[in-house]
Amino acid sequence: MEGITTPVYRKVHKKYFGGVDRYFSPFIVVTSTHNLKKRETREYIPFEKDMTPQILTAAGTDFAWAAKMLKGLGYDEVNLNLGCPAATVVTKGKGAGLLRNKENLRVFFEDVFSENDLPDITIKTRCGFWSHDEAEELAEIFADYPFKELIVHPRIREEFYQGTPNPDSFKIIKNKVKCPVIYNGDIFDVSSLRDHLETDDGIMLGRGLLRNPMLAEMKDFDIYDSRLQGFLNELYDEYMSIMSGERDVLFKLKELWTYLIASFPDREDEFKRLMKASTGAEYKASVNRIIHSYT
């Protein structure tokens, strides 16, 4: 997730918590200039063996260029983002914007797979742009190309993250394609995780793992887990070692807390103080009060 699941987050998370087989980078934006911003190169340099770079682009030729470049750096798998619903992304024909025109989507894939020496390619997609009725046509397109796997978030672009994921759309795609289909969407507890593991080829966790960093261990959030304090302290220290000052570090950590606070019932007042913190000392004091108020 952009701005949150950075190399620092991935490094510290895997140190304190287990259960994750593969991490995905926030998306790397690729344009026809092939000039990547420095902040994006930090997502895949240095090489991470258990990380899949996620590419956001509007053209198949640009995706193929990025895929080959990343393969040259050692990555044997890349991911195409067809799911981001943000207006700033969609209006440029990227993310979920690629789902709007099915003919253009097929041209995109033709341009990609006309190239040789590509790494394995996975897709993160929604079930349509305007309507869940699009799932059948999308499934037919996906079935024509040799993807390693599809990661399906069973909402359409117009739903963003509202409402309930549509299991019927997910099944339409899963039953049509030949590759494994991974479920993504609204998995916030072990019960939901276990249900999907019993029926699906795999699970991608997003917001659920930010709320509960131990969820991939098949463990509901444990307020008393001593690793949590170490995880948060080390995130702060790692960011302080590479960023320009407390202000930027606090901005990044506060963004994480907009998800994490869901696991701390009845601590909204302290959360508001945390979001107003202007120094590291104020931030750490709020974190300590949130965590230790339950001990």
Image: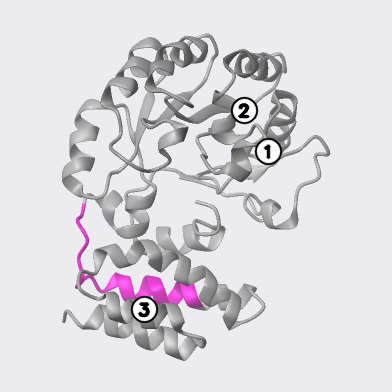
Q: Residues within 10 Å of mark 3 (few under 14, many from 20)?
A: few
The type of residue carrying mark 3 is Lys
The type of residue carrying mark 2 is Pro
Q: CA distance from mark 1 to mark 3?
A: 41 Å
Q: Residue at x 47, y 30 (%)?
A: 125
Is 173 rendered above or below residue 42? above
- Residue 177: give x, y in percent of width and height: 41, 13
> Regarding mark 3 in the picture, which secondary structure is present there?
helix
Horizontal side, residue 180 vs residue 62: left or right: left
The residue identified by callout 2 is 119
Residue lying farthest to the right in this orientation? 33
Q: Quadrant of residue 205?
A: top left
The residue identified by callout 3 is 272
Residue 234 located within the stretch drawn in magenta = yes
Q: Residues within 10 Å of mark 2 (few under 14, many from 20)?
A: many
Q: CA distance from mark 3 to mark 2?
A: 45 Å
Magenta region: which residues? 219-236
> Regarding mark 1 in the picture, which secondary structure is present there?
helix
The residue identified by callout 1 is 70
Horizontal side, residue 97 vs residue 276: left or right: right
Q: CA distance from mark 1 to mark 2?
A: 8 Å
Residue 231 located within the stretch drawn in magenta = yes
- Residue 20: give x, y in percent of width and height: 37, 47
The type of residue carrying mark 1 is Leu
Q: Earlier in the sequence, mark 3 or mark 2?
A: 2
